Image (cartoon, coloured by chain):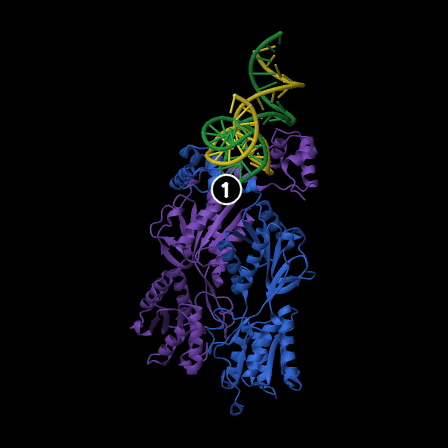
Chain colours: A blue, B purple, C green, D yellow
DNA sequence: TTTAACTAGTTAAACGATTAACGAAGGGCA
DNA sequence: TGCCCTTCGTTAATCGTTTAACTAGTTAAA
């Protein structure tokens, strides 16, 4: 069962394959008579012709394909949404996305870029599992590339898209404050990541603005952000002399630990203690009891943005002129049941 | 900065491009002198030649590429491990894997298969998000295909790989029984899936073998398997007249709900009630307190197996002769702290 | 001295499209 | 009639490889 090719259609329609190519690529404007065009289309349909993209790609030097290079983004849980967003929009716009996971190994990365280049991919999305700043991957220097969930130490030449950590954490604080809380505890991490730094900065600025004295005694940081770290931090804060009325956790997993601490200490969520998470991690945030109020990381939207921007660049002939942009997307508040208005009686 | 091609290397080495091709494809056995071979290799290296796979693919009708078609497997959380397994092993064996997510839309699926075929992929992995049996996707009929996390209603023509649901659930029951439990409760689903059916069958057979009378009163099924369903089921069982000493949950998420029920009823896990999950869902099973004992679904291994098997078929010239196999992989017990030996005093 | 068999390459066709350049037929006009 | 335009297609080169078939020179055997 051989694949039908251009020349088969041509033979069936009694014309040359050039004519068929012209008709099928909508380039026949004033070059092919209507009757021939109709005949060609009919035969192509009848024979179920579909172009061999490998041959086309060789001839045109285009591939309508983009590559997504990631550390471990695809396999890792919820950040897979970035991949989904990028893949879907590429697909919708008639492009194919090939992703390869380099397991954060730079030698692998080099091989991956090479393998994709060998297949004539026209541009790249470089995705990071966690939000960070990085130096330029050398092999990508001359390639159209969008940085996803990471940004360059020296931008200007390429676009990137990241979550607006500071603005989003500020939104979370606003929400807590709007609910009447002032004695707000912070459970975070010292691990030097953009998220860790910016979210805690937003917390601090909000507390300063509220003029909460000695807010530092309401902060607890561990190195990592696992559930148990959240537990340890929450125990410290909830058993301390100055018990906060609300807890703002760096991550949903830490919030999960905070739930356990609250339960152990005999505090009800949210009646006795409000808890705010961050990430909206699937299968955790909504499965906790009570369901956790948190901030939705814009993984899907970032993926969408990256693919759209890259394809814009690639489809635009004068792509040099296109604007490079360092995009930030704000997280959405997802309000569930773990935050309640502050009430003095509950203290 | 044009890509270096075969003829550039040939010119630099002072030979024809056929010679370069012969040397570089290790086909020069007795056809090229050692000195020329050395010269060619040296120039290739110096010019950083890397073959254009599009051209090669056009010529050889091979692509060293396989396609993975999935419903929503990639984006969905932990089943991404299947993708990771397949991608990594393809990569290790020198193949590229292109995956496309069809969002369980059959029209999309058709387009996806076509798009991949147009790019000369040599074979397919068809992956399902949840374990099920399905009918043959028509477009794949004549393509080398492995079915991953699903099986055909009429196999024989193609291989497939799925978790050994019955055997694995039996293992879980053995573990509970070895810990002295006899009054074991079941929290499951009525939603007709292979997993739901087989795991509960394993439970029932184990209870029969134990000769536990009227075990049906220890079973509770809901339609879905969310945390809240597990909560509802566990409340029913734990507050009933016949309180089990251990709970076997269809999924980790249900187990999460069971934890909440136990806590609410004032039962400690595992001292007062042992809880066994299923899935080993990342960020849940190990983050629960106490960490959940559960069965590790072999997602990664299944992905590995599928890719290896497919590539075996493709690399084997006489692939017709290759054995079709309906493979089942057993889950591994991951023992954490939610199951304790039964002790009469705890009742 | 033929003929055969190696050795060490080269030539050229092919893979399946795209597209610049060409050409034949017909019409219009001076 | 001669010349120029259109109109409607065709020819043939090209993308970068692979590989069957060929060549030329040397050696060995009959």
Q: Residue at x 46, y 43 (%)?
A: B313
Q: Residue at x 69, y 37 (%)?
A: B43
Residue B173 visible: yes
Q: Split into 4 quadrants, where in the image is the N terminus of chain B?
A: top right
What is the residue that sits farthest to the left in this orientation?
Answer: B214
Q: B62 or A230, which lies in front? A: B62
Q: Residue at x 59, y 45 (%)?
A: A118
Element assignment for label 1: loop
Q: B7 or A218, which lies in front? A: B7
Q: Is residue B118 above or below residue B287?
A: above
Q: Is residue B31 above or below residue A291?
A: above
Q: Chain of mark 1?
A: A
A61 sits to left or right of A291? right
What is the residue that sits farthest to the bottom in this orientation?
Answer: A345
- Residue C8, image x and y in percent? 65, 26
A212 sits to left or right of B190? right
- Residue B176, image x and y in percent? 41, 70
Residue wearing tag 1: A27
- Residue B272, image x and y in percent? 43, 79
Residue B300 visible: no
- Residue A284, image x and y in percent? 49, 71
B324 sits to left or right of A102? left
Q: Residue at x 52, y 50 (%)?
A: B97
Query: Dot 1: within a 10 Å radius of its alpha carbon, few (fewer than 14), some, or many (20 or more) residues?
Result: few
């Amino acid at each position: 069962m051989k694949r039908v090719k251009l020349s088969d259609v041509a033979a069936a329609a009694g014309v040359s394959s050039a004519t068929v190519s012209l008709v099928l690529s909508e380039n026949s404007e004033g070059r092919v008579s209507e009757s021939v065009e109709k005949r060609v289309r009919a035969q192509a349909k009848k024979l179920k012709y579909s172009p061999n993209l490998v041959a086309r790609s060789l001839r045109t030097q285009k591939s309508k394909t983009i590559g997504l290079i990631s550390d471990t983004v695809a396999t890792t849980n919820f950040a897979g949404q970035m991949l989904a967003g990028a893949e879907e929009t590429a697909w919708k716009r008639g492009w194919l996305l090939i992703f390869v996971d380099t397991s954060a190994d730079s030698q692998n990365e080099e091989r991956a870029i090479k393998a994709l280049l060998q297949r004539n991919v026209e541009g790249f999305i470089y995705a990071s599992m966690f939000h960070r700043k990085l130096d330029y991957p050398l092999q990508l220097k001359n390639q159209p590339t969008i940085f996803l969930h990471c940004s360059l130490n020296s931008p200007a030449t390429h676009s990137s898209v990241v979550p607006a950590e500071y603005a989003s954490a500020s939104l979370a604080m606003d929400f807590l404050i709007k609910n009447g809380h002032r004695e707000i505890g912070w459970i975070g991490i010292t691990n030097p990541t953009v998220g860790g730094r910016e979210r805690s900065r937003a917390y601090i600025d909000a507390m300063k603005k509220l003029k909460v004295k000695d807010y530092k005694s309401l902060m607890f940081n561990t190195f990592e952000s696992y559930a148990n770290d959240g537990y340890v931090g929450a125990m410290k804060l909830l058993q301390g002399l100055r018990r906060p009325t609300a807890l703002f956790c760096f991550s949903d997993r830490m919030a999960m630990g905070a739930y356990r601490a609250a339960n152990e200490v005999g505090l009800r969520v949210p009646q006795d203690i409000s808890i705010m998470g961050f990430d909206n991690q699937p299968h955790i945030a909504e499965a906790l009891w009570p369901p956790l109020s948190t901030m939705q990381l814009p993984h899907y939207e970032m993926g969408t943005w990256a693919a759209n921007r890259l394809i814009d660049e690639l489809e635009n002939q004068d792509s040099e002129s296109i604007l490079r942009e360092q995009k930030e997307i704000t997280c959405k508040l997802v309000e569930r049941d773990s935050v309640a208005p502050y009430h003095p009686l509950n203290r």
